[in-house]
Amino acid sequence: MKKNNSKKSWAYELETTHILNFALFFTVIAVVGVLAVALPKPKISEYEKRDLAAMPQFTWQALFSGSYTKDLELFFADTFPAREKFVEISARMEDMRGMRMDDVKIHEQPSTSQSQPPSAPLGDQFPAQQPEKEQEQQAPPAQEQAPQQPSELQAVENDVEGEKRGSVFLYKDMALPMFGGNKPAGQQYAQVITNYSEVLGDSVTVYNLIIPSAIEFYLPEKYKDQGITGDEKDNIDYIYSQMGEKVHTVDAYSKMDQAKDQYIYFRTDHHWTARGAYAAYQAFCQEAGLTPVPLEDMEYHRIDGFVGSLYGQTQEIRLKENPDYVEYFVPPQPHTTYRYVKNEPYTPYPSTVWASYATSGPNTYSVFLHGDFPLTHIITGQNTGRKIAVVKESFGNAFSPFLISHYDEIFVVDQRYFQLGFINFIQQNGINELLFINNVFAANTYIRINEISRIMYQQFVPPVYTPPVEEPEEETQPEEIEVEEEEKPKKAKKKKPVKKDDDEDDDEDDD
């Protein structure tokens, strides 16, 4: 009898446990669901540096075509509670295999494997315009310095030890990405650039500029013989030696070495600063026969509170407690700017060179060109007879604005997202100068190299359009749901000089 009672008691407890578990599970689901609907929805992902999906506007056409439900699903997925933290955790787990940035994934031992390019740029959507919170500086920009200059890292300090954390070297309050090098990839990079010079011939002057990283200048002497990082100067010189005679190689390294006592790299981010880009701009001017505009002749801006990608990689508290600031310099030359988004390569949208929404935090580097777009077109009216195309990854964003003072038109092409046949594009727009600018990691990474090669003759294939179901003419439309949604920029009224490829309906060449 006791045995039967014991079995019944055990079964009752088990049943009760199951009921409580189910109740708890559905309670959690219900709470999360309520929070997902009720909590304020973020518009920007600071970690991913992109705009999040907006609440779709309800229409019968959108509902019947299926686009409304898809957009609604994307909206809730993008604004899920604590999504930003989950994304960060996921990225951190992925980063254990190497440091992933927008331009390249850095490994201690570079991989020669090829991976697929991203399907879309992070900055396809137009960021919400926010009040500008910049701090205007009255002091001469040449005298502006970082709170703690990277040049201090050159001194040997026995009481300060550096720390190797994954593929990043931490020293004091600065994070330095470690370079491995990949000469076979560098040789392929040189060959691709050479191919452009041979195809374009004498009608287009081809330049190449490879950007060294911060560790090349700021790794303390006591660590340089320990094999912590590869020799970037040697790698760059090797790549340049493999290029054809028609390619004009730009020695940015020497100019940046001369300027290393200035604030030329961020401490918390893998990018260079505007001052680093300016040093490279001086080197380019020397090679291109131009006179660089002094920084003192440009309008100076500064944005404080920038904590970038290397803090996201390491989560080092010293980096967070010593944030960077972002400077930018506006040339005096008037100009007009347009940008082109993914899948709309023939549609110019009025834009600006510097983004007002970049006010602080991880997204601040997007002040340059609003981030990464397939194409940004800057028209100056200089009447110099010179038009240049700049092929770049994100490092080129801080560099390109300095060219405003020298060219009639500047076509800033992101090699990762550009969708037209680039050779055809150059010829149709009368471009007579071509600059490839890549950081040293990108120049040693096959995926970046293959992207530069692929865009030569690729052909744009418009996305498949599903026409909406026609509604009865007499049917009264329901009142649309009112949502806060940013307005998409209006298309430019003036016709742009970008011409369509002859075979725009052919299949895209993926290689």
Image (spheres, rainbow, N blue to C red):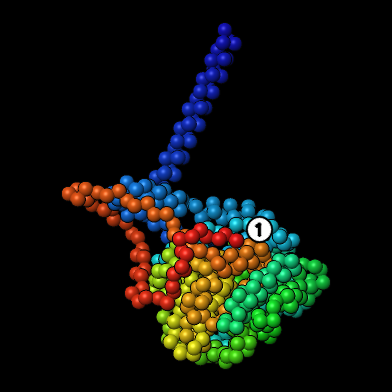
238 relative to 362, above or below:
below
Q: Amino acid at mark 1?
A: Gln
270 horizontally vs 71: left or right: right
The residue shown at (54%, 23%) is: 14
Q: Nearer the viewer, residue 205 or 258?
A: 205
Whole-percent x and y of residue 281?
59, 84
Q: Is residue 237 left or right of residue 418?
A: right
Apparent side of residue 3 relative to residue 75 in the rendered image (left or right) = right
Residue denoted by label 1 = 114
Q: Residue at x 50, y 25 (%)?
A: 16
Observer-nearest residue: 338 or 497?
497
- Quadrant the C terminus occupies: bottom right
Expressed as whole percent of the image width and height from the top left, the position of residue 324 reads 57, 73
| Among the 4 quarters of the image, the one containing residue 111 | bottom right
Q: Residue furthest right?
A: 225
| Secondary structure type for disc 1 | loop
Q: Quadrant of residue 105?
A: bottom right
Classify residue 191 as left or right of residue 490. right
Q: Position of residue 403 (x, y in %)?
A: 53, 83
Quadrant, the N terminus = top right
Examine the rendered structure and indicate whether residue 411 appears above or below residue 52. Answer: below
Find residue 204 and report its horizontal and vertical position in percent. 57, 81
Residue 239 seen by the camera: yes
State the residue in front, 220 or 328: 328
* Residue visible at 44% across and 44% down in the picture: 32
Extreme-left residue of the structure: 474
Q: Quadrant of residue 505?
A: bottom left
Q: Nearer the viewer, residue 196 or 14?
A: 196
Residue 39 visible here: no
Residue with the most extreme top position: 1
